[in-house]
Amino acid sequence: MEQLHQQLPNIYVFRLVSELGSFQAAANQLGLPRSSVSKKVSQLEQYMEQRLLQRSTRKLRLTEDGLRLMNATESLGQLVGETRHLLVEGRQNRREGW
């Protein structure tokens, strides 16, 4: 069985789908086919052995387990954003001769 750290990209995709409310919107933002985004979420659900999203033809809804995962990984999303900001800022400072 895969290790949890190998699921981090799938968790990121799951969070994006949940935040944007659709597989297509997440696919557009990631520059991936919708089917690839759906597959990543399905892989995460298999790993977690839980359904994380309730899918219907018109909308997505987080299951209780999906909501728990969103809450548990909230700091992960913040950490990625903060790290990216620091890296971009550092690159700009180097260009400016800091």
Image: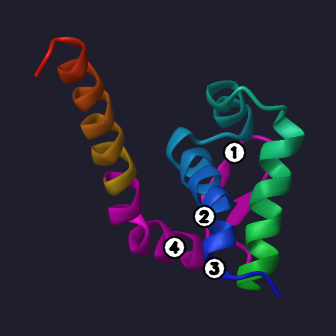
Magenta-highlighted residues: 51-78
| Amino acid type for the residue under numbered disc 3 | Leu
Q: Earlier in the sequence, mark 2 or mark 4?
A: 2
Which residue bears the numbered disc 3? 4
Upstream in sequence: badge 4 or badge 3 = 3
Find out whether residue 10 is within the magenta segment: no
Q: Is residue 10 above or below residue 30?
A: below
- Under mark 1, the amino acid is Lys
Magenta span includes 76: yes
Residues at marks 4 and 3 touching, judged by CB atoms closer than 8 Å: no
Q: Nearer the viewer, mark 4 or mark 3?
A: 3
Check disc 2: other Cα within 10 Å, few if <14, some if 14-19, many if 20+: some
Q: CA distance from mark 1 to mark 3?
A: 28 Å
Q: Cβ–Cβ below 8 Å for labels 3 and 2?
A: yes
The residue positioned 78% from the left and 31% from the top of the image is: 32
Mark 2 vs 1: CB contact within 8 A: no
**Residue 8's disc number:** 2
Disc 4 marks which residue? 69
Q: Could you tell me which residue is drawn at 67 percent across and 69 percent down? A: 7
